[in-house]
Amino acid sequence: MGGEKLLENTSKDTEGLVLLGEFGKEDLATLYVAYLRGKKDHVVEFVESVQPPIPREKKWVNLISTLFGCPVGCAMCDAGGTYRGPLTAEEILSQILFMVDRHYPRRAVPVEKYKIQFARMGEPSFNDAVLDVLERLPEVLDAPGLIPSISTIAPAGREAFFERLLAIKNRLYAGGRFQMQFSIHTTDDELRNQIIPIKKWGFEDIGKYGERFYREGDRKITLNFSPAPEWPVSTGVLREHFNPDVFLIKLTPLNPTEKVINAGMKSLIDPANPAKYADLVRSLERAGYDVIVSIGALEENQIGSNCGQYATLFGSNNRLCIREKYSTMRYLRYTSAEIGRSWTPGTENQHEKT
Ligand code: SF4
């Protein structure tokens, strides 16, 4: 391993993926927009990012889409809404290989921490092909630092997916090479149902699954919260269901998605005002949890590459455009000639509202 095994790069792997646009900064985050199946209503976005000043060889993150749209429709997420079905394993892999080929055409990825997060568009547990990809990744890439990450809202009825996932983790990614994350956002059940408006596992189910999922040497399971100030996060409820030896808490800002802006939602995790969330961090730590406050580069919000953001949509006359509230166009690096006709670079005022 470690770059010795040279894997064959065949253009066939990514040929179904047609790049429409590329936005961002090489030394921070790049957002790719592409379509699959030769259909412009089968658009996907995927992202690669680094964390300055850490070089890519130390840490590199890929975020990929697993569904065309998402049927869940979380309150803060622009990827929800229109749903056109799951991607195939090849289509999911093609996003990864597209980004790998740009930097490591021999598909040997010498990155110490190479995270692949199935988290751009789509709840990953709605697509069994995600599991097929997890099984194939170690054959397709020579990437000793690979750490796949599943971030889920734990939909009800997807138990078979989670059972197979557990077995795959133990078989291929034991010893801390897998990151399991549950997006919770609040410990108030009623509010959680409003924020994530589908039937899903209760805290007890997640807690029990986590106890079975976690083995010594694994990474602790992450409970994700992107809370607004009025969303309760009760240490009492957490301690009742989530063992701090198995679960940790990650707090992230509620990013400025179109939904967040339109609803006037505010973020408790405010990078400009740590005092706002200091009490919460203290109380979680006192309850025994490891707490990660994860605040990325704010410029990622402008690029549109952050969690919950989804930059493109179809305008009223079926023209693909960038959301009006995003400044993604300022970071334009490439658009295909095809999209250039309907999506003129630099003329943000031509973008349509839906
Ligand atoms: S946060 Fe995830 S599950 Fe919720 S709408 Fe967005 S993509 Fe779907």
Image (cartoon, grey):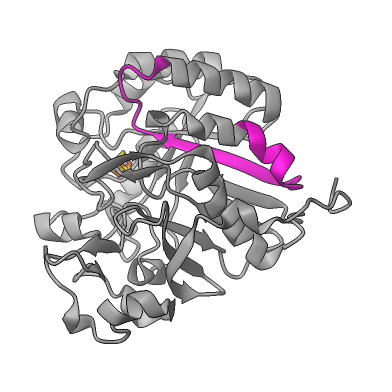
Q: Is residue 152 above or below residue 350?
A: above
Q: Is residue 137 within the magenta segment?
A: yes
Left or right for 113, reference 226? right
Q: Could one spot residue 55 in this view of the protein?
A: no
Question: Where in the figure is residue 8, as x and y percent of width and height?
Answer: 77, 53
Counting the numbered discs, the total is 0
- Is residue 31 toward the left or the right of residue 10 in the image? left
Looking at this view, name the residue that lies furthest to the bottom. Answer: 346
Residue displayed at 59% across by 60% down = 99
Q: Quadrant of residue 234?
A: top left
Residue 116 versus residue 157 in the image, above or below:
below
Q: Residue at x 54, y 19 (%)?
A: 164
Quadrant of the frame with the N terminus: top right
Query: Image quarter for residue 354?
Result: bottom left
Vertical placement of residue 193 versus 77, above or below: above
Task: Tell me which residue sits at (14%, 72%) in the image.
Answer: 352
Residue situated in front as seen by the camera: 44 or 300:
44
Based on the picture, tell me whether residue 161 belongs to the magenta stretch. Answer: no
The residue at the far front in this view is 38
User: Residue 268 placed where, x, y %?
Assistant: 25, 51
Question: Which corner quadrant of the figure contains ligand 1?
Answer: top left
Q: Is residue 271 in view from this perspective? A: yes
Residue 5 image point, x, y percent: 86, 49
The structure residue drawn at horizontal position 76% and vertical position 45%, both measured from the top left corner, is: 144
Position of residue 43 relative to residue 140, above or below, is below
Nearer to me, 89 or 243 = 89
Query: Picture coordinates of residue 58 (x, y %)?
Result: 70, 59
Q: Which residues are magenta?
A: 135-159
- Of residues 108 and 289, the one drawn nearer to the viewer in this rendering: 108
